[in-house]
Image: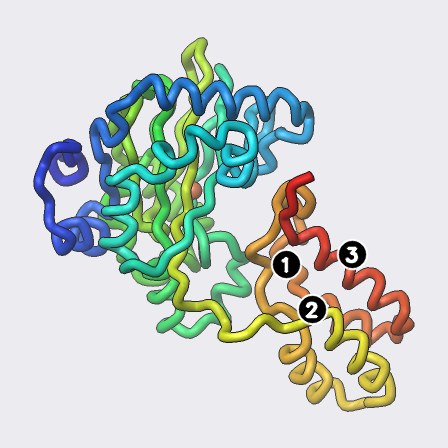
Amino acid sequence: MDDQIVIHHDQNVSVDEIQERLENGAGALIIRGAYQDLALLDSVSDAFSERIQSEGNHAADHFASGSNRRLWNALNKLAEDAPHLFAEYYGNEWLHRVSEAWLGPLYQITAQVNVVVPGGAPQTGHRDYHLGFYPESLVAEMPDLIRRASSKLTLQGAIIHCDVPVEMGPTKLLLGSQNDSDGYLTYRRPEEQERFEREFSQIPFKKGDLVFFNPSIFHAAGGNQTSNPRLVNLLQISSALAKPMEHLDFPALVRFVYPHLLNNTDRNLVSRAIRAMVDAYPFPSNLDLDPPSDDWLGELETTWLLKAWETKRSPSEVLSDYTNRRNRRVYSSA
Ligand SMILES: [Fe+2]
């Protein structure tokens, strides 16, 4: 099984083979020894740990219970805290080789550090960004074409900062499950969860490995049963192809148009017009200021503005709340 997944950093592997393994093969890759300079990883770990400490409770992991830690936007934060390490760390050859094999040359990297403390609980099986994040009801509304496209638009990755033996909970993967039909729709159901727990594979990671997986593969981080923390930097590499052609000034649209919507009684028309007035998507965001919450993905800007219209909220209140909401999404360093 290992040879379906593991590639050694000095191995010669074609772009087509990388793509084939991620798309139709196991759905995951481990590049052993992608980072040869382990002292670099230690220095970056120190910078991340200092930042996590300075953030205190703020760095609690919203995706897990207990005292696991999560550092949002580990890309900007490393640039601020240790800019001399940035190029070697985020410029890693294998990181870009695999990203380019999956997405071509037009991609954007985002990163979030995850520290799972000793005793940290395992995750339940799930699928990742984009469609893996959304409630089943929203996924059900997506045409099959978009469900299939979702996994082609991102690549999930992780930079491994310490040895991760099985007891420390390396990612559990259901190999080949990236092509399950309706995978995004059904993964929460009990029979699918049972299948996952029965059939997953788990391969130990080594410090300096880079791990990549197809975002639609059924997977879960394992629990940490050792006495050491597990530090990995999680990466989403996003295709740039779905970006709009222009920046829209959403608060201006709300400011000018919302007062006129209040004079309109056609709910269907208003609902359609609102789709042209606000951001259709909750990402990208600043997850420090706009952290995951129960309604994080449930209340899209379109839903929020329609609700404001239905309850006849005043233009000044709506504009002020909307501007605050927009401001929370923008990252700016102090
Ligand atoms: Fe995940």
- The reply, left or right, for residue 184 in relation to residue 195 is right
Could you tell me the amino acid type at mark 1? Gly
Q: Which one is earlier in the sequence, the residue at label 1 or at label 2?
A: 1
Task: Work out how far the residue at label 1 is from the one at label 2, CA to CA, in angstroms.
Answer: 9 Å
The image shows residue 52, relative to residue 102, as above or below, that is above
The one nearer the camera, 245 or 254, is: 245
Task: Work out how far the residue at label 3 is from the one at label 2, CA to CA, in angstroms.
Answer: 17 Å
Could you tell me the amino acid type at mark 3? Asn
Q: Residue furthest top?
A: 227
For ligand 1, the image quadrant comes to top left
Could you tell me the amino acid type at mark 2? Thr
- In the picture, the quarter occupied by the N terminus is top left
Q: Which mark is residue 60?
A: none
Q: Which one is earlier in the sequence, the residue at label 3 or at label 2?
A: 2
Marks 1 and 2 close (CB-CB < 8 Å): yes
Residue at label 3? 324
* Element at label 2: helix
**Tag 3: Cα neighbours inside 10 Å, few (<14), some, or many (≥20)?**
few
- Across and down, in percent, residue 181 comes to 31, 62
- Across and down, in percent, residue 131 comes to 45, 58
- Residue at position x 24%, y 31% from top? 34
Q: Which one is earlier in the sequence, the residue at label 3 or at label 1?
A: 1
The image shows residue 45, relative to residue 111, as above or below, that is above
Residue at label 1? 298
Task: Work out how far the residue at label 3 is from the one at label 1, CA to CA, in angstroms.
Answer: 18 Å
